[in-house]
Amino acid sequence: MTYLRVVRDFLPPDELAAMRGAIVAQSHRFKPVGAKGGMNLPYSVLNGRELREHFPALAAFAAGPMLAVAQELAGEPLKLMDDRKRDMRLQWYRGKHEGFRWHLDGGLYGALLTVTNDNDGGTEMLTPRQSRWLWPVPYVLYPFPRILELAGPTPIPAGTGDLVVIRGGDIIHRGVIRKDCGDRILLAASFDPVGRVRPRAWDALARWLNY
Ligand SMILES: [Fe+2]
Protein backbone atom coordinates (compact mmCIF):
# COMPACT_ATOMS: atom_id res chain seq x y z
CA MET A 1 0.00 0.00 0.00
CA THR A 2 1.33 3.40 -0.91
CA TYR A 3 0.41 5.59 1.96
CA LEU A 4 2.72 8.60 2.05
CA ARG A 5 4.43 11.03 -0.26
CA VAL A 6 6.36 14.19 0.58
CA VAL A 7 7.06 16.67 -2.24
CA ARG A 8 9.80 19.10 -1.26
CA ASP A 9 9.41 22.77 -2.24
CA PHE A 10 6.05 22.16 -3.86
CA LEU A 11 5.58 25.92 -3.99
CA PRO A 12 8.47 28.30 -4.83
CA PRO A 13 9.43 30.78 -2.07
CA ASP A 14 7.93 33.86 -3.75
CA GLU A 15 4.52 32.22 -4.26
CA LEU A 16 4.65 30.84 -0.75
CA ALA A 17 5.41 34.29 0.68
CA ALA A 18 2.47 35.76 -1.25
CA MET A 19 0.17 33.02 0.05
CA ARG A 20 1.37 33.57 3.62
CA GLY A 21 0.86 37.34 3.31
CA ALA A 22 -2.70 36.89 2.05
CA ILE A 23 -3.54 34.52 4.91
CA VAL A 24 -2.00 36.66 7.65
CA ALA A 25 -3.84 39.72 6.29
CA GLN A 26 -7.11 37.87 6.90
CA SER A 27 -6.17 36.17 10.17
CA HIS A 28 -9.31 37.61 11.79
CA ARG A 29 -11.39 35.17 9.72
CA PHE A 30 -9.98 32.13 11.54
CA LYS A 31 -12.19 30.58 14.21
CA PRO A 32 -10.91 28.81 17.31
CA VAL A 33 -11.72 25.12 17.65
CA GLY A 34 -12.16 24.10 21.28
CA ALA A 35 -10.60 21.16 23.10
CA LYS A 36 -13.90 19.16 23.07
CA GLY A 37 -13.66 17.80 26.61
CA GLY A 38 -10.20 16.31 26.18
CA MET A 39 -11.07 14.60 22.90
CA ASN A 40 -8.93 16.96 20.86
CA LEU A 41 -6.54 19.88 21.18
CA PRO A 42 -7.36 23.48 20.32
CA TYR A 43 -6.34 25.16 17.06
CA SER A 44 -7.85 27.69 14.65
CA VAL A 45 -9.52 26.96 11.35
CA LEU A 46 -10.98 28.60 8.28
CA ASN A 47 -13.36 26.12 6.64
CA GLY A 48 -13.95 25.14 3.02
CA ARG A 49 -16.85 27.50 2.40
CA GLU A 50 -14.90 30.47 3.77
CA LEU A 51 -11.80 29.42 1.85
CA ARG A 52 -13.73 29.44 -1.45
CA GLU A 53 -15.20 32.85 -0.63
CA HIS A 54 -12.14 34.68 0.68
CA PHE A 55 -9.22 32.76 -0.85
CA PRO A 56 -10.41 31.51 -4.26
CA ALA A 57 -6.80 31.07 -5.50
CA LEU A 58 -6.01 28.77 -2.57
CA ALA A 59 -9.22 26.81 -3.13
CA ALA A 60 -8.23 26.34 -6.78
CA PHE A 61 -4.76 25.23 -5.70
CA ALA A 62 -6.24 22.59 -3.38
CA ALA A 63 -8.64 21.35 -6.05
CA GLY A 64 -5.96 21.40 -8.78
CA PRO A 65 -2.24 20.79 -8.09
CA MET A 66 -2.77 19.25 -4.63
CA LEU A 67 -5.45 16.89 -5.94
CA ALA A 68 -3.14 15.88 -8.81
CA VAL A 69 -0.36 14.78 -6.44
CA ALA A 70 -2.83 12.88 -4.25
CA GLN A 71 -4.15 11.13 -7.35
CA GLU A 72 -0.64 10.07 -8.34
CA LEU A 73 -0.14 8.52 -4.91
CA ALA A 74 -3.55 6.86 -4.95
CA GLY A 75 -3.17 5.49 -8.47
CA GLU A 76 -6.86 6.05 -9.06
CA PRO A 77 -9.14 9.02 -9.80
CA LEU A 78 -9.93 11.12 -6.71
CA LYS A 79 -12.33 13.94 -5.99
CA LEU A 80 -12.67 16.38 -3.12
CA MET A 81 -14.42 14.81 -0.12
CA ASP A 82 -18.17 15.22 -0.42
CA ASP A 83 -18.50 18.03 2.16
CA ARG A 84 -17.87 21.63 1.14
CA LYS A 85 -17.21 22.74 4.69
CA ARG A 86 -14.54 20.14 5.49
CA ASP A 87 -13.09 19.16 2.10
CA MET A 88 -10.50 21.97 2.26
CA ARG A 89 -9.42 24.34 5.02
CA LEU A 90 -6.67 26.43 6.55
CA GLN A 91 -5.40 25.29 9.94
CA TRP A 92 -3.40 27.56 12.26
CA TYR A 93 -1.49 26.26 15.28
CA ARG A 94 0.11 28.45 17.94
CA GLY A 95 1.98 26.89 20.85
CA LYS A 96 2.60 23.43 22.30
CA HIS A 97 -0.87 23.16 23.81
CA GLU A 98 -2.37 23.25 20.30
CA GLY A 99 -2.38 20.44 17.77
CA PHE A 100 -4.45 17.52 16.60
CA ARG A 101 -4.63 14.28 18.54
CA TRP A 102 -4.26 10.80 17.03
CA HIS A 103 -7.00 10.23 14.49
CA LEU A 104 -8.03 8.82 11.14
CA ASP A 105 -9.29 11.29 8.51
CA GLY A 106 -12.82 11.47 7.13
CA GLY A 107 -11.43 11.47 3.57
CA LEU A 108 -9.25 8.56 2.44
CA TYR A 109 -6.39 10.84 1.29
CA GLY A 110 -5.23 14.10 2.87
CA ALA A 111 -2.90 16.70 1.37
CA LEU A 112 -1.13 19.20 3.63
CA LEU A 113 0.80 22.16 2.28
CA THR A 114 2.96 23.77 4.97
CA VAL A 115 2.58 27.52 4.46
CA THR A 116 4.47 28.49 7.63
CA ASN A 117 6.28 26.46 10.25
CA ASP A 118 8.04 28.62 12.84
CA ASN A 119 7.14 26.53 15.89
CA ASP A 120 8.66 23.22 14.81
CA GLY A 121 5.24 21.74 14.16
CA GLY A 122 4.82 18.49 12.34
CA THR A 123 2.71 15.48 11.50
CA GLU A 124 3.49 12.14 13.13
CA MET A 125 2.13 8.79 12.00
CA LEU A 126 1.97 5.17 12.97
CA THR A 127 2.96 2.54 10.41
CA PRO A 128 0.23 0.93 8.26
CA ARG A 129 0.63 -2.26 10.30
CA GLN A 130 0.27 -0.44 13.63
CA SER A 131 -2.68 1.51 12.23
CA ARG A 132 -4.45 -1.68 11.20
CA TRP A 133 -4.18 -3.11 14.68
CA LEU A 134 -4.76 0.08 16.60
CA TRP A 135 -7.45 1.86 14.56
CA PRO A 136 -10.16 1.72 17.27
CA VAL A 137 -7.72 3.08 19.84
CA PRO A 138 -7.62 6.81 18.95
CA TYR A 139 -11.33 7.08 19.58
CA VAL A 140 -11.54 4.86 22.63
CA LEU A 141 -8.45 6.33 24.26
CA TYR A 142 -8.65 9.92 23.09
CA PRO A 143 -8.02 11.30 26.58
CA PHE A 144 -4.91 9.10 26.92
CA PRO A 145 -2.67 9.93 23.95
CA ARG A 146 0.43 8.62 25.71
CA ILE A 147 -0.70 5.06 25.16
CA LEU A 148 -0.31 5.58 21.41
CA GLU A 149 3.06 7.22 21.93
CA LEU A 150 4.28 3.86 23.19
CA ALA A 151 3.69 2.49 19.68
CA GLY A 152 6.57 4.73 18.52
CA PRO A 153 5.27 7.42 16.17
CA THR A 154 7.18 8.25 13.00
CA PRO A 155 7.63 11.99 12.32
CA ILE A 156 6.97 13.01 8.71
CA PRO A 157 9.76 15.38 7.72
CA ALA A 158 8.09 18.39 6.09
CA GLY A 159 9.23 22.00 6.11
CA THR A 160 7.74 25.22 4.83
CA GLY A 161 6.68 24.85 1.19
CA ASP A 162 6.57 21.05 1.30
CA LEU A 163 3.47 19.06 0.41
CA VAL A 164 2.57 15.93 2.37
CA VAL A 165 0.03 13.50 0.97
CA ILE A 166 -1.06 10.77 3.36
CA ARG A 167 -3.59 7.98 3.18
CA GLY A 168 -5.01 9.44 6.37
CA GLY A 169 -8.23 7.42 6.25
CA ASP A 170 -6.17 4.30 7.04
CA ILE A 171 -3.03 5.65 8.72
CA ILE A 172 -3.35 6.90 12.31
CA HIS A 173 -1.66 10.29 12.57
CA ARG A 174 -1.54 13.49 14.61
CA GLY A 175 -0.32 17.08 14.48
CA VAL A 176 2.18 18.24 17.09
CA ILE A 177 3.69 21.62 17.92
CA ARG A 178 7.08 21.50 19.61
CA LYS A 179 7.69 25.19 20.42
CA ASP A 180 5.59 27.76 22.21
CA CYS A 181 6.46 30.70 19.98
CA GLY A 182 5.76 30.99 16.28
CA ASP A 183 3.03 29.75 13.97
CA ARG A 184 2.26 26.68 11.90
CA ILE A 185 -0.19 27.30 9.07
CA LEU A 186 -1.40 24.52 6.77
CA LEU A 187 -3.52 24.46 3.65
CA ALA A 188 -5.26 21.10 3.91
CA ALA A 189 -7.50 19.18 1.53
CA SER A 190 -9.30 15.83 1.80
CA PHE A 191 -9.94 13.53 -1.13
CA ASP A 192 -11.87 10.33 -1.75
CA PRO A 193 -11.83 7.88 -4.63
CA VAL A 194 -14.52 8.72 -7.18
CA GLY A 195 -17.65 6.80 -6.23
CA ARG A 196 -16.64 6.07 -2.62
CA VAL A 197 -19.49 6.04 -0.10
CA ARG A 198 -18.40 6.91 3.42
CA PRO A 199 -19.88 5.30 6.57
CA ARG A 200 -22.24 7.78 8.20
CA ALA A 201 -21.41 7.15 11.86
CA TRP A 202 -17.73 7.69 11.15
CA ASP A 203 -18.57 10.91 9.40
CA ALA A 204 -20.65 12.23 12.29
CA LEU A 205 -17.81 11.53 14.73
CA ALA A 206 -15.26 13.21 12.48
CA ARG A 207 -17.51 16.25 12.14
CA TRP A 208 -17.93 16.53 15.89
CA LEU A 209 -14.19 16.24 16.50
CA ASN A 210 -13.32 18.78 13.86
CA TYR A 211 -15.49 21.89 13.59
FE1 LIG B 1 -5.68 14.19 9.64
Image (spheres, rainbow, N blue to C red):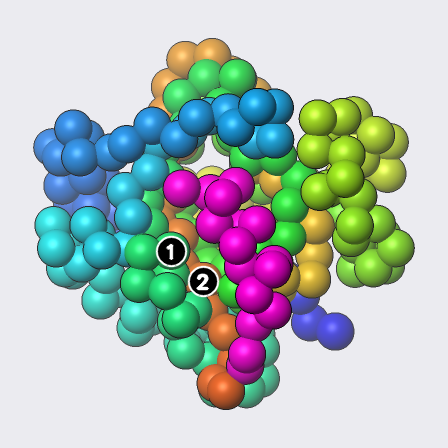
Identity, as a three-letter code, of the amino acid under mark 2:
Ser
Instruction: Name the residue: 19% across, 50% down.
Output: 50
- Is residue 168 left or right of 140 when viewed as pictured? left
Tell me if residue 95 is in the magenta stretch. Answer: no
The quarter in which the N terminus is drawn is bottom right
Q: Answer with the quarter of the image where residue 37 lies.
A: top right
* Residue 154 place in picture, x, y as percent: 73, 42
* Residue 125 place in picture, x, y as percent: 69, 46
Identity, as a three-letter code, of the amino acid under mark 1:
Arg
How many labels, in total?
A: 2
Crowd band around label 2 with a 10 angstrom C-alpha radius: few (<14), some (14–19), many (20+)? many
Q: Which residue is mark 1?
A: 86
Q: CA distance from mark 2 to mark 1?
A: 8 Å
- Badge 1 marks a residue whose secondary structure is loop
Q: Is residue 96 shown above or below 194?
A: above
The quarter in which the C terminus is drawn is top left
Q: Which residue is mark 2?
A: 190
* Residue 17 place in picture, x, y as percent: 21, 41
Foreground tag (2 vs 1): 1
Instruction: Name the residue: 50% across, 74% down.
Output: 192
* Residue 8 place in picture, x, y as percent: 47, 55
- Majority secondary structure in the magenta region: helix
Instruction: Name the residue: 23% across, 61% down.
Output: 59
- Is residue 207 left or right of 11 when viewed as pictured? right
Near-viewer residue (42 or 59): 42
Q: Are marks 2 and 1 in contact (CB under 8 Å)?
A: yes
Label of residue 207 in the image: none
Q: Which residues are magenta?
A: 196-211
